[in-house]
Amino acid sequence: MSAEPAFLDLSPADCVVPPGGWEPLAAAADGHIHVTEAGHVRLYGAPLIDVPGFHPAAGPADSGEIGWLGQTDGLVTLGAGLRLGMMSTQIARMLDVVEAPVRLCRGGIIQIEGLEEGVAEQVVRALAPLGLIFDAGSELLQLSACGNCGLSRSDVHYDALQAAAEGLEGPTHFAGCEQRCGAPSGDHVEYLALGEGEYEVS
């Protein structure tokens, strides 16, 4: 294909989005934000613009964990994966409401830091239904997809979730075209869209 997807990979200072820092990113995003395997935020269809609080991404972020993580000061850090590696702008703006720093980590993990236990429980109840995954054993953590941009030959997000409902055979990536955006670096099963709902599996 001659066309190439347009995207912009960004990172906040020290890989931490401060309270209130998600709004500029959400305002620049086209509906959703991809948190990449390297721990960067990727905006699809984004022009090369300045997003306050973010700079062009360089090296990968530190590793992170998923789940309810204690801190030495008695507060809680919540580690979460993202369904399909994607964060809606709704989730981004809700993270601002939480008023806690959010660390971006390798593997597409975010860690919401410094929460009182009661607040942490509310965050899980509010954000898990929207696509944050707080269970390190969830099969959905093995599933990824490209950004579903205008080059995609099928609705890869819908198709990927349908496949997950039927069961996965290890890490699986759905790609809408030969660019294979967001594909994991390790071994995985690839579904490459050939047409609407039609895939080549390898």
Image: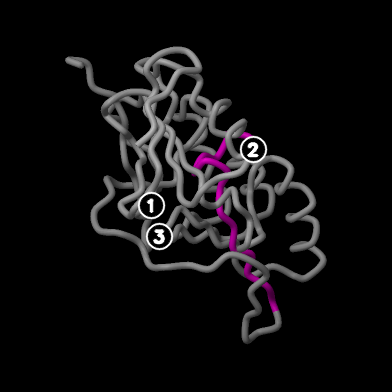
What SS does tag 2 mark?
Answer: helix
What SS does tag 3 mark?
Answer: loop
Residue underneath mark 2: 166
Image quadrant in which the N terminus is located: top left
Ranked by sequence position, the earlier of labels 2 and 3 is: 3
Q: Which residues are magenta?
A: 75-90
Residue underneath mark 1: 37
Mark 3 is on which residue type?
Arg
Measured as percent of width and height from the top left, residue 19 is found at 57, 54
As for residue 89 lying within the magenta part, the answer is: yes
Marks 1 and 3: CB-CB under 8 Å? yes
Q: Looking at the image, is mark 2 or mark 3 nearer the viewer?
A: 2
Residue underneath mark 3: 106
Q: Is residue 72 above or below residue 140?
A: below
Q: Nearer the viewer, residue 52 or 84?
A: 84
On the picture, is 30 further left or further right than 161? Answer: left
As for residue 172 lying within the magenta part, the answer is: no
On the picture, is 105 further left or further right than 76? Answer: left
Ranked by sequence position, the earlier of labels 1 and 3 is: 1
SS assignment for the magenta stretch, majority: strand
In percent of the image, x 64 and y 65: which residue is there? 78
Measured as percent of width and height from the top left, residue 15 is found at 40, 59
What SS does tag 1 mark?
Answer: loop
Mark 2 is on which residue type?
Glu
